Image (cartoon, rainbow, N blue to C red):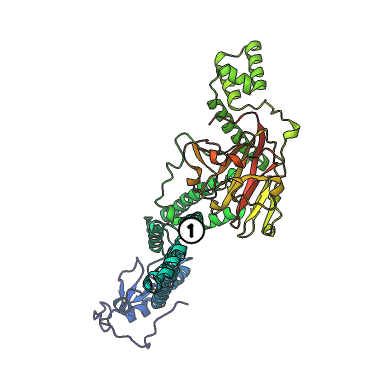
Amino acid sequence: MVDQVNRQEPYVENSFEVKCSKHIRWNYIYIHLQEDSQDVLKCQDCIIEEQLSTENLIQIYKILESKENTIFKNWPPFESSKKKQLYEDICKETNKNNGIDILQAQLESYFKDLQERVIEKIQSTFKKLASQMNEVILSESQILNIYNQVSQKEELKNVISSFTQNKQEKINLLQNIITNKIKQTNVNTEIFINAIHDLQVNKPVFSLKTAQTIKQRVLNMIDLIEVYEAYPQIQLDLTNSNSRQQSIQLFQRTVDDKVKIIIDLIANKSNFCSNEFISEIEQTLKENKFIFQNLSFDNIYLQGCYPIDFSLLKDTQIQDLGLLKDVICSSEQKYQSHQLPLNKLSQDMQPISFQILQFIQKNSSFSQVYQQQFENLLLKYPIFDEIVEDPMQVIPLKFELSERENKQHANIIQNDFKSWVFQLNQNAYCQAYIPFTIDNNLKYIARIRCQSQRQDHIWVGLVPAQDRNTLLIYEQNVISFRYNSKTYNKVKEVVKGKSLHTFSHIEELEIHFCVKDKYFACTDFSNYQNLNKTSQEYSQLFDTNKEYNLAFLMYHQNSRIQLTFFQAVDQFPVI
């Protein structure tokens, strides 16, 4: 039964004072929502007479009093099967705006908390850096303290101030001070050389460059703050839901593609990054995906070049590639150092490869172009040649720790590639050596890789075998090279390039030495751009009557040394 308006129901006054054309006693109070209705406006008698359902009626006063947030249950028209749900959804979504005060309060609280925490963090960091600056200033004042102590200024001042009393005694005191200081000239010199060096090495360089970069990044990150999960800088057509969804999906796909490119580059197996590190990087990039909006990936690779995919290779195969790199660099250096005809060079340095090449030239119908390509390949990659070594000169690349008081702070381990590594667990002078007695008549080449936050406290040198548990490499009577420092360093004569001690980091160091020839030199492997050796003044340190071990000394925690190559050779490469 249709709902009907009862004539006795309370009548709501409204400002629409228009009389019904059929029932002039009553004003119009409803709009009839039917397109076939003869009269859209209805009074209460019209509704009773025509038996109209309230589902198709809307009160005029409600329209007149409607506000921005007024929702009519039966207007605008919807499909019958969906109109109830749509009405409920519209009411639900629009009612959310009623809590705007709560949202604004949450937003205000968020930014207030952010401001307080940022200010607190800035103040904390400022205090820490100011404290560090004071420590640097104090370390600079230590030089003055040492000078005042060594120069005995106060004693001189006291003697001169009371010179008129016991004049002869004061003259004797002055003479004693002067005589003692002259005798201590070498000691004074060493004290100040070491003090100034330590200050220069340890003193950080003040620079706001990194701080300015971080400040700009912080400001940029603040600009990215959003309280709605939206995609900024995307123009969405709100009247076209398909277009909006496609735009979001396109943006998401583009960002994900960029993240994948970066992760693929980092995760390249040749970089040996751990899965934990890669996962953390990927998560961080995804959390900050909007930074890629204005970052172009069009020129990410060099023209015509693409990353080599090592994903199908085993770890041992990648290790072999690293060794092949060393062979190629070493071979190229050898070729550049000899002024021989190409065929003679091939025959002397790659006998097996040269024989194969001769066989192909005499017994095949390959074109001249192909033969030339094959020759170049054999020159570059001497894969068929074997290095014939004297069994007596196969040197084990394993360390042993010197028996000293700090031995417990170091250990010898094997890395993932079964190579032996000498490493420190905490700050302490610890020494290790190769348990192989050097033949003083032979020439040797050794290569080491060092990992340390500071390389200035790393030494390599020759220690007499009988003293390897008592002498430290930096002592005066030991032949040694010190990284990143010219003090306690006997390899300072520049033969080619620059002084190696000026380099803050050397990825791999190659050492050449021969006790009989009184020769000890270091160069940067595999570039060979710089060569330093011991000068003539240290020639007396080479004693052919002594037996020597190749030894290493470190100080800083987490420092590591790996011996990658140790071989007796006929001649040193020409550098």
Q: Secondary structure at mark 1?
A: helix
- Figure label count: 1
Q: Does the rendering let one see residue 75?
A: yes
Residue that label 1 marks: 195
User: x and y percent of residue 41 in the render?
Assistant: 30, 74
Seen in the picture, residue 339 relative to 421 is either above or below; the reply is above
Residue 238: which quarter of the image? bottom left
Q: Does the rendering let one see residue 201?
A: no
Would you say 155 lies left or right of 453 here? left
Would you say 339 lies left or right of 294 here? right
User: x and y percent of residue 497 in the render?
Assistant: 47, 37
User: x and y percent of residue 84 in the render?
Assistant: 47, 70
Seen in the picture, residue 46 relative to 194 is either above or below; the reply is below
Q: Amino acid at mark 1?
A: Ala
Residue 333: which quarter of the image? top right
User: x and y percent of residue 199 in the render?
Assistant: 47, 58
Seen in the picture, residue 354 relative to 566 is either above or below; the reply is above
Q: What is the crowding at mark 1: few (fewer than 14 residues within 10 Å), some, or many (at least 20)?
A: some
Closer to the camera in the image, 16 or 400: 400
Closer to the camera in the image, 184 or 273: 184
Closer to the camera in the image, 435 or 52: 435
